[in-house]
Image: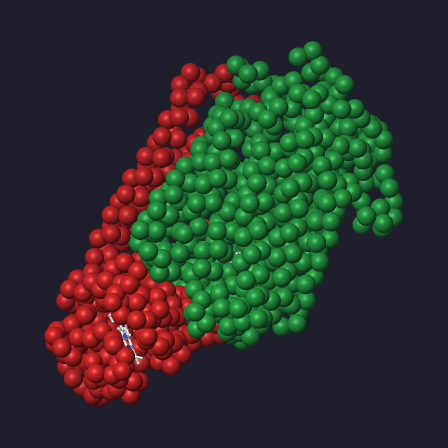
Chain colours: A green, B red
Amino acid sequence: MSDIAAGQPVPGEAHPRQGLRGGPSYLTAEHGLAAWFLTTDHKRIALLYAAALTVFFFIGGAGAVAIRMELFTPAADLLSADGYNRMFTLHGTVMVWFFLVPSIPNTFGNFLLPLMIGAKDLAFPRLNLFSWYLFVGAGALLVGALVAGGVDTGWTFYTPFSTGYSQSYVMAAALAVVLAGFSSIATGVNFIATVHLLRTPGMTWFRLPLLVWALYGTSLVIVLATPVLTLVLLLIVAERAFGLPIFDPALGGDPLLFQHLFWFYSHPAVYIMILPSFGVISELVTCFSRRQVFGYTFMVYAILWIAVVGFLVWGHHMFVSGQSLFASLVFSFLSFVIAVPSAIKVFNWTFTLYRGQITFEAPMLYALGFIGLFTLGGLTGLFLASVPIDVHVTDTYFVVAHFHFIMVGGAVSAFYGGLHFWWPKVTGRLYPEAWARFAAVLMFFGFSFTFFPQFVMGFLGMPRRYQVYPPEFQIWHVLSSSGAVLLAAAYLLPMGYLAWSLIWGERAGEDPWQATGLEWRTSSPPPRDNFRAVPVVDTGPYFYHPDKEGPRHDRREAHQNQGHET
Amino acid sequence: MSGLRLWPVVASDVATRVDAIVVVLLLITGAVLALVLALLLTFAIRYRRGSSARRGALPELVQKEVEIGWTAATLFLAVFIFAWAGATELGLAKPSGDALEIHVAAKQWMWKTQHPNGAREIDALHVPRGQPVRLLMTSQDVIHSFFVPAFRIKQDVLPGRLTELLFTPTLTGEYPLFCAEYCGTLHARMGGTITVMEPEDYARWLSAQPEGDDLGHEGRALFVSLGCSGCHAGNGPVRAPGLAGIWGRDVPLEDGRIRRVDEAYLRDSILQPRRDVVAGYEPRMPSFAGLVGEDELIRLVAYIRSLPGGQP
Ligand code: HEM
Ligand SMILES: [Cu+2]
Ligand SMILES: [Cu+2]
């Protein structure tokens, strides 16, 4: 513990050493367009992804705005019936494949994974750049299909509607999703190889920060599940374009085969969307509680458990599809089993607060909001896993609320929390704290206001994907649409003050949060090669206090960094 | 609008049993949520920076044991809910012998229903209170889903397959029917009304319906006009099994399997005769896929069902 003091920044002191450690920062190391668009620096590629994802977040968001405006009244006011169907298809397709799946892995993952394990870059830097081009190409194809006239199958592409009946650009959209899938596979392979090969000396598996574990688990799921999506979408193209009889019963095919294959990917995909946020939340909670994560090893096993069992529960999306009762019961059982590791994570985050020295900076507020929303989202999953209840609420707004609690209340909140936490590292600037706290609180209430009413109307019987609806549901839709206004404000606000901070923000030191991870052991923003010298690790992560003790009673404990430089 | 409703109408036996689980699950999940929120709030306030609460090492109790403890507790809770919900579902799935059988055909974007005596309705269904009802459903195009919130029932309706729904209405009134599986342009308008009537009223209503020929009669005409009788009447050039009395029996197949004769089996026999060849016969029956529509299939099935045991 002799080197705690070395390189330990004094809180609050501005760092004039900016960019000196290991040369100029990655932002200023090279200039010109080519230096960005042909870069192999994982940090620059992370920013390229961030730019692309922002564009898609706006496109998907525009779809949500159109949906919520239309649903303000029971009648069709703004859109034609087909127009509405195209809108929710746009919203779902873009949000799932072009925002949520890549969101945390390709931005924070790309930026932080090498930093957190003490590496100079990912294992395959050029593959990393290639995956970005694939992703943007796929996005362009999708946007092309949307501009040309749109797609009206829903993001789920159910057959035989999508193969035999839809009159829209199904094949272009399916191919776009296939390409986006290849891009995720490339990232997944890259992450797996990096974690296996490039850990710095002393960074053993059980010293990895939980975000790294989460990204590793996610990558395994991506690499194993995405090929199935590719296959099923190509089969759709085969049937639609060449009339190969696969899914359409009129040709002797089986429409349920499609659903099995689709959900075999898409259930694991919900874990692709949520696992990385588990990692982010673990980093935030421990840092602002000044305590080691409660039950680190259990947290690791929970991630792996979820990654494995996530492959065995797809049939819970098909309880009313006509699958056998026996199959439904087996899938129901496994779905209950997978609720357990999620519950463990919630309890462990909560107990990380116990006997801490907690402060409430914006990232912590996002994290606490996440825990609340994720808990409610997860608990409603128990209703859906119970076959007789699911029969009633599936394909209603209850399900819409459930997955938004997890994917938007959960994953998107975690994204914003992580964004604030690592913003100083990425840009070298501090964001304005008061605004950020306000935005975090607004996001929590805006979100609950938007999506909680959907549980009620779903249980009352309001089906999803309906443009017109019986007037008795209007009150709930009005509440939901009003909440959405707050939510939109909460999403836009940070974009404003974060941009502001790029120019006027205070300069951040190396380690503004006094966090333990290796990513804080280098300048903010980091140099091209991340570290001045190879860091060496001799403790586990989150050494906010010695193992058998806790933080002091009277003040925040000086923490010990995970690594030191050679 | 008739006041603010927070719970859907309870109008079937299924609804009563589903609601019981919902209530218990609401209590359990409410308690868990309250526990998590209470812990979060208490810890956040008590251990905020600068408070004088005790810190230091965690007490013995809150070490590994507690972790194993709550893993076991959640697992136990999960298995308990599963067992209860599963048992309820198994109870609901029991078919009852004297159910009123109604055929439902879905197509973009309407529901066609037909009563055993042949009376037809569109986007509507009348049923008597207290009588078990069995819906036999199929689609003529894409997948739809028959959803009646007041009964807590929902079942996808698939092309090329029969699916069924069982329920007993318990409360008279008119309840909305929705299509719950996205099926294209007018999906949101593919609805209807289910009317539950007292049995006497239902009987009166039924007798006032325009006389449809009953399904079995129409089926017999088809059986002749499609040429089935040429083989199955017993004296044609092809040796084919007699169909009288086969309903509900177990048929041994050429490949050693045994199948119970029900709607699904009859449909398969007509549309994909090669799949289940009856033991002792040549696979000489041609497929009628594409030649007979859903409506006609329903009639053929009804006809075969109506044949008394013994010789045709
Ligand atoms: C930010 C990330 C978001 C993601 C990843 C997301 C994801 C999804 C997905 C996967 C669906 C299902 C689409 C389908 O039915 O095919 C959906 C539906 C929907 N979303 Fe979102 N969503 C997000 C944000 C929002 C927001 C902010 C709003 C409201 C302002 C919203 C409102 C809706 C509505 C109303 C539907 C249901 C459409 C219907 O079934 O008619 N979503 N969303
Ligand atoms: Cu799932
Ligand atoms: Cu529909």
Outermost right residue: A31
Which residue lies at the image location 59% right of the left edge and 37% below the top edge? A216
Residue B179 visible, this orientation: no
Q: Name the side, left or right, on which A518 lies relative to A265.
A: right
Rendered residue at 49%/65% (across/down): A246
The answer to whether any part of residue A97 appears in the image is: yes
| Residue B82 drawn at (x, y percent) | 31, 44
Quadrant of residue B81 within the rendered picture: top left
Vertically, is A187 above or below A554?
Answer: below
Query: Please, is residue A443 above or below residue A82 in the view?
Result: above
Quadrant occupied by the C terminus of chain A:
top right
Residue at image location 40% in from the left, 56% down from the top: A318
Pick whichever, A60 or B233, lies toward us. Answer: B233
Q: Position of residue A431 (x, y in %)?
A: 70, 40
User: Left or right of B16: which side holds A115?
Assistant: right
Q: Quadrant of residue A365?
A: top right
From the viewer's side, name the closer residue of A412 and A70. A412
Q: Quadrant of residue B238?
A: bottom left
Residue B201, compared with residue A318, is above or below; it is: below
Q: Position of residue A511 (x, y in %)?
A: 71, 28
Residue sitting at x 25%, y 83%: B236
Image coordinates of residue A161 in percent, x first then y, are 48, 69
Location of the N terminus of chain A (image quadrant): top right
Q: Is residue A215 left or right of residue A325?
A: right
